[in-house]
Image (cartoon, grey):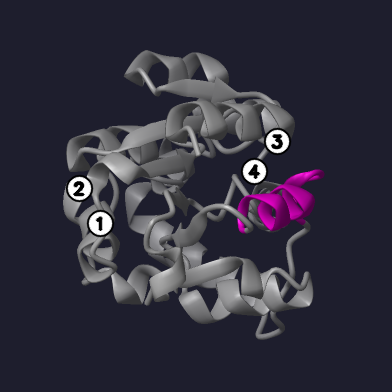
């Protein structure tokens, strides 16, 4: 919960994968191992992934792009889990993000909203010594099984923390982040280095699109006007 001396601050909701953590590189690497195992000719690159990633997540790619039959997908996903193994794999963070988070945490309340597990996010933040930057991490298990772009996904943290919608900005890398935040009544800034391309993000009218962490900081300060 926000301490009394921070209640007057503005608030930033961050998506995690594709904004802070470069999970996309890891996803491509694991997927290519899977495709090779099943002798599929397609190989993912960053460009191919971002051109084909749409609302609805990765599952449509398995049939539409990789050529798996719908009835094969469940088995393929189980194989994917085996490839990943039981060892926790730490993704890298995007260049410039750790320093940005440390600066922002000095004048804003920072939160993470993610479909990943909060325990895994906390492991990553602690590894990079960023856990102290955030008031609270909201993983999927904290969001009552709501998913983006449903506004409840975004409103649960706002209500729990007793935040004014006019003092929140959502930072995301997908159409669902931007659409969901707007449905919840929040401002939203898109990051173009994540899972969806600039051309897709701009279609849903975010308050701004940032192409670098430096631009993101400028847009945040402009939207929230500390």
Residue 153's label in the rendered image is 1
The span from disc 3 to disc 4 (Cα, nearest Å) is 36 Å
Question: What residue is disc 3 on?
Answer: 213
Helix, strand, or loop for circle 1? Answer: helix
Q: Which mark is residue 40?
A: 4
| Highlighted magenta segment, given as a residue range | 93-105
Could you tell me if the residues under marks 1 and 2 are in contact, i.e. CB atoms within 8 Å?
yes
The mark that comes first in sequence, 2 or 4, is: 4
Q: Residue at x 48, y 32 (%)?
A: 225
Taking the spot 52% from the left edge, 53% from the top edge, the residue there is: 108
Residue 111, above or below 96 = below
Residue that badge 2 annotates: 150
User: Front-most of 88 and 220?
Assistant: 220
Looking at the picture, does residue 21 appear above or below residue 67? Answer: below
Q: Earlier in the sequence, mark 1 or mark 4?
A: 4
Q: In the rendered structure, which disc, 3 or 2, sits on the residue that comes first in sequence?
A: 2
Residue 213 appears anywhere in the view:
yes
Q: Which mark is residue 128?
A: none
Residue 22: image x %, image y %?
Answer: 69, 50
Q: Position of residue 204 (x, y in %)?
A: 34, 20
């Amino acid at each position: 919960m926000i301490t009394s001396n921070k209640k007057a601050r503005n608030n930033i909701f961050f998506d995690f994968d594709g904004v802070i953590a470069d999970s996309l590189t890891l996803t491509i690497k694991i997927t290519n191992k899977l495709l090779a195992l099943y002798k599929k000719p397609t190989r993912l690159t960053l460009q191919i992934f971002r051109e084909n990633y749409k609302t609805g997540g990765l599952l449509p790619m398995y049939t539409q792009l990789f050529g798996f039959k719908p009835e094969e997908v469940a088995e393929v996903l189980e194989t994917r889990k085996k490839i990943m193994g039981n060892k926790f794999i730490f993704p890298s963070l995007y260049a410039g993000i750790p320093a940005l988070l440390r600066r922002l945490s000095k004048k804003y309340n920072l939160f993470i909203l993610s479909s990943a597990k909060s325990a895994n996010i906390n492991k990553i933040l602690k590894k990079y010594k960023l856990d102290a930057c955030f008031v609270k991490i909201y993983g999927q298990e904290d969001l009552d099984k709501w998913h983006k772009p449903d506004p409840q996904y975004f409103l649960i943290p706002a209500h729990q923390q007793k935040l004014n919608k006019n003092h929140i900005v959502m930072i995301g890398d997908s159409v669902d982040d931007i659409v969901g935040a707007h449905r919840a009544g929040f401002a939203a800034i898109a990051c173009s280095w994540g899972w969806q391309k600039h051309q897709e993000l701009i279609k849903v009218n975010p308050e701004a699109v940032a192409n670098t962490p430096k631009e993101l900081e400028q847009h945040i300060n402009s939207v929230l006007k500390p």
